[in-house]
Image (cartoon, helix red, strand yellow):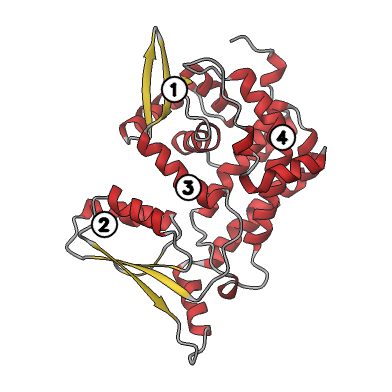
Amino acid sequence: MATRPELNTVSPQVARLARGLKLGANSMLVTLFGDVVAPRPQALWLGSLIRLAAPFGINDRLVRTATFRLSADDWLDATRIGRRSYYGLSEAGLQRCIHAGKRIYAGDAPEWDGRWTLALVRGDARATIRQRLKRELLWEGFGAIAPGVYAHPNADAGSLGEIIRAAQAQDFVAVMEATSIEAFSIRPLQALMHQTFKLGDVASAWQALLHRFSPVLADAHGMAPADAFFVRTLLLHEYRRVLLRDPNLPEQLLPADWPGRTARDLCHDMYAALLDASEDYLREVVEVSDGNLINANRVLRRRFGAGSHAEAAR
């Protein structure tokens, strides 16, 4: 697919948004596949992945190495057509993206009823099972309040069940519910959550994200396609990185000035403003193994409530 040279050029002022960030090839490709490919499961040509990654300082060698590693880790499936390689999400990779998407693109945490979900992992579980459970539970928003004890105030039972089954840990995890007793102060619980989830560090990370992206919000709606794609991907990449550390606690357990609320509002507004132009860019530069890139606007507009904002901006 031939593309106009100017279409692929990210403007210098927009490119500066990435200054000081460490953008790993594996992590960036996970962001791309989760945001671009998951809503329209197709296999992308390796050359397209190289083109999409280039503005982030990731060269073709790093992309090739990353796709190999992600395939080995059962994130991606590789398909060979002629002399070309195409990569799509594996079944396991798609499930991981669906789980992540529930947190990344969802709205605020639901009203809390005071109940906690506890996942208790047996100490005699194999190390590989414990490690996988810890990684997946922390990403799901559970906090490790003690060795082998994970707690979540708004756990999704379906997602938790899928995590346990995927780790083949049905015989090693007990799931329970707990509630606070109203006669006792909530302050120790708030302090425990602050320690468990390192909320001070998370707040600093949210502030850094706001400092980096807030200045370009006013210009987001009118950006050129290459710029819009760059900002959309970089924003999601950094948002996902911080969200991995943020448990999305109920309002009752958060400080009054919690910056995570402002960061989610920023993503809500920017994603809507960047969506149309960034999709134009993807349709122009991406080649897939079967036909054209599927139009996924209906799905994408539901992310962060983007549809209502995008339409209001027109």
Q: Distance between the residues labelled 1 and 3?
A: 27 Å
Pointer 2 and pointer 4: residues touching (CB < 8 Å)?
Answer: no
Mark earlier in primary sequence (2, 3): 3
Q: Mark 1 to mark 2: distance in Å?
A: 33 Å
Q: Residue 314: x, y in percent? A: 83, 37
The residue mark sitting in front, 2 or 4, is: 2
Q: Earlier in the sequence, mark 3 or mark 4?
A: 4
* Front residue of 75 and 241: 75
Q: What residue type is labelled 2?
A: Arg
**Direction left: furthest residue:** 124
Residue 147: x and y in percent read 30, 68
User: Which disc number belongs to residue 14?
Assistant: 4
Helix, strand or loop for disc 4: helix
Say above or below: 236 vs 265.
above
Determine the CA span between mark 2 and mark 3.
20 Å
Q: Tell me what residue is drawn at x 54 percent, y 71 percent.
A: 112
Q: Where is residue 79 in the image (x, y as percent from the top left)?
A: 37, 19
The residue that label 2 is drawn on is 130
Q: Earlier in the sequence, mark 4 or mark 1?
A: 4
Mark 3 lies on residue: 100
Eyeballing the image, is 297 above or below 286? below
- Say the numbered circle drawn on residue 61: 1
**Would you say residue 212 is visible in this rendering?**
no
| Secondary element at image label 3 | helix
Relative image position of residue 59 (x, y in whole percent)? 50, 24
Query: Are there few (<14), some (14-19), or many (20+) residues within 10 Å of tag 3?
Result: some
Q: How crowded is mark 4: few (under 14 residues within 10 Å), some or many (20 or more)?
A: some
| Residue 259: quarter of image | bottom right
Q: Which amino acid does label 1 sit on?
A: Arg
**What amino acid does circle 3 point to?**
Ala
Q: What element carries label 1?
A: helix
Residue 117 sits above or below residue 93 on the image: below
